[in-house]
Amino acid sequence: MVLKLDEIAPLEWTKDDWCKMHFRAMGTGCQIIWRAPSRKQAVAYRDSAVTWVMEFEAKYSRYREDSLISAIRRGAGEHWVTTDADLESMFALCDHWHWSTGGVFDPTALPLEQLWDYKAETPRLPSEDEIKAAQALVGWQRVERKPGSVYLPQRGMAIDLGGIGKEYAVDRVIEQSLPFGITDILVDFGRDVRGVGQAPQGGPWSVGLEDPNDPGTCWGGVKMSNRAVTTSGDYLRGFQHEGRQYGHIIDPRSGRPVANGCHSATVIAPTCTEAGVLSTAALILGPREALQLIERSGFSQGCVWQGDKRHDTSRFASYVL
Amino acid sequence: MQARATVLAICLAVLPLRRSMAEDRVDFTVGYYLEDHHRVDVWTSALLWETEVTPHTTMRLQGVYDVVSGASPTGAPPTQKTRTVTKEVSTSVGGSQVVAGYNVVSGPTGTPPTYVPIFATVGAETTTTTQTEVVPYGKKYLPVQEFEDERLGFNWELEHRLGGWILTGGAAYSEESDYKSVAGTLKLGREFNHKATLVSLGASLGHDQVLHTEEDSARWEDKDIVEGQLALVHAINPKTLLTLTGTLGSAEGYLNDQYKYASVDDEIVREQRPDSRDKRIALVMLNRAVDSLNGSAELIYRFYTDSYGVDAQTVGFTWYQKLGKRFILAPSLRYYEQSAADFYAVQFTDAPKIYSSDYRLSKLATLTAGMKLIWKAHDKFTVSLAYDRYSMWGRDGQTTNEAYPDANVVTLGFKLWY
């Protein structure tokens, strides 16, 4: 298939040698802003990055029946499925973060997410038995792997890279910019953001942080260079039942939506993958454990909103504008 | 890119001062020179075939092929990048909150962006004016000229021995996209003292052509070179060999490097060198076998002076250590220093007629540390692998150190006698 990249992701030149592009991928809006050494290099990088993202989505989206992830799901309880290098890399990250978060990050939690379907016309509360049945299909530690292939031991199990895939793509697209001589760049895939070098206005990139208590405005912002920032929140997606709000983020330990009063968690980390996993885990864990987890990771900082109170890690304030 | 050494230099370099035993052989050498930060890289390869045409006549044919690419400082002074910035300056009176403008906004992953108003001030009277200014950004950078070229060269020699006399004649040709060179050499040697002493006198004539380009035209410029060399090789005793050479040379014509520029009265213009250059070189080399250590030492001193005002000295030491019957390890160290050309400066004023800011004409020094391993794989076949670390630095306190290269050089060689 020949991608018409000029139509999918037209380049927009802003000022001096800065350019940006918007395109849709992975079910969300994506934008990249960068300073290119030349227009030729800018086009070459656009072509490389967008093509890679499209191929990445085709291979790893659970919404596409011809994807590798769907093939793994169909093979559950039946046969091994051959993986590839990118998937092996993501599985290695899943290993690490599943262990680091004490199982809160679990790429096999799809049966629970489907059970709590907030997109249904009339969302309903699942029964206790249904929750237990779905939980029985969840567990990253149960996924069997050997070099170059993977096997889900029970029919009904599935892998969903939704919690890590987009963030991984941000990191890879940043890495791909280096051979093109690009040293100043910001990648924003569905508001998962990573910035390198300087912003067009000079100095570090500034990223606004949406106020969970007043969506559409920012409670503040952070400045960063060579860092990623992601926010997890359940205040925009979820459903109400009998007057009670249920968010879309599921705690795999309880099999239920997060109900600790936290509605937003933001993490700044060296990579987008790390920031994304930590911000989701932070929201599930609640302020006390979340801050410990973020601090323990070594190079990350963050904050968690519980109601109208913000809980910060020790050095998060140094990033705040 | 102009050749760093002319064909003439090749001619003199390959003319052996001392004839070894009659033998047919093939040498092949491939080398890679890489400057730090990947500024310049050079692939070089050379094939030499030597054969005995008659019992008294030996012929040598050599082909050289180089590929060079990279970027070299033009000589123009370090430059500061600038850009025009448009700033909106807001003056607010009253109000309670100012929301800064962000590059992007982070929110719940995957949700549609809901960007905040940029530069909004709540409840205040705001006056906004737009100002533009040129501001510096980034570090200063050294202007460089990028290049990519190939060089193909051939060298042919015929050496004839008659009694104690040795007559050598040669011709050479090399070509790059912007440089052509042709040269001829003639050398007469005489052996005395039961072949323990060799005296030789050689002369070379060369004619180079340099492609000079202007914005909308190009023309070939001429350069003529003549050199003479007197050499003495004397075996002081069976373990000590002394070599003395004296060289006189003169080049006339187009001697500029058209890729080099200079800042003259704050304008960047092409360099202008004198149209003649005379040089004198003296070389002393001593080789000494040290049986007790199963090795030998080589000591070199070279003095160079020319009409540009450049005086240079080189001191080198190499130790050849035999390791068993088949290996020789040769660590080496070489130091070189030169004074600046009379017409070299970082910047010029008052419109001089002759000027150059080519760092190669500045007051500088180089240090080369190397290690070579020679493996005698067979009585008639050897393989050698050499690594050299080359460092150059300025000594005038004015030329930016960024101009001087450091480089790694790896050379692989094969010799086959048959």
Image (cartoon, helix red, strand yellow):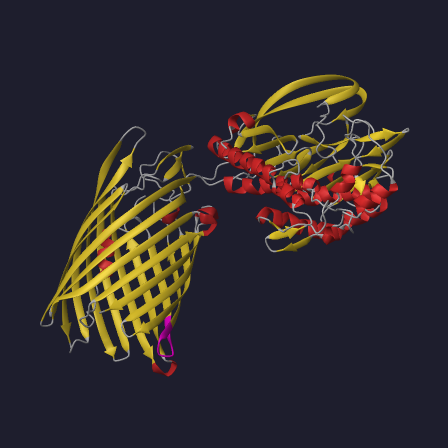
Where is B258 relative to B321, above or below? above
User: Which residue is more in the foreground, B112 or B100?
Assistant: B112
Q: Is residue B369 magenta?
A: no
Q: Locate residue A307, reporting x and y percent.
A: 87, 34
Please identify the dominant SS of the magenta region: strand
Question: Which range is magenta?
Answer: B319-328
Residue lying furthest right: A242
Residue B145 spot, x, y in % from top left: 39, 40
Instruction: From this view, report whether residue B11 is shown above or below residue B399.
Output: below
Q: Residue at x 28, y 77 (%)?
A: B240
Residue A307 or residue A60, whichever sits in front = A60
Q: Residue at x 27, y 30 (%)?
A: B217
Q: Is residue B186 left or right of residue B32?
A: left
Residue B414 higher or lower than A173, as above or below: below
| Residue B398 in view (yes/no) | no
Q: Position of residue B168 (x, y in %)?
A: 14, 62
Foreground of the two, A270 or B10: A270
Residue A20: image location, x then y, percent: 58, 29
**Quadrant of the image containing the C terminus of chain B:** bottom left
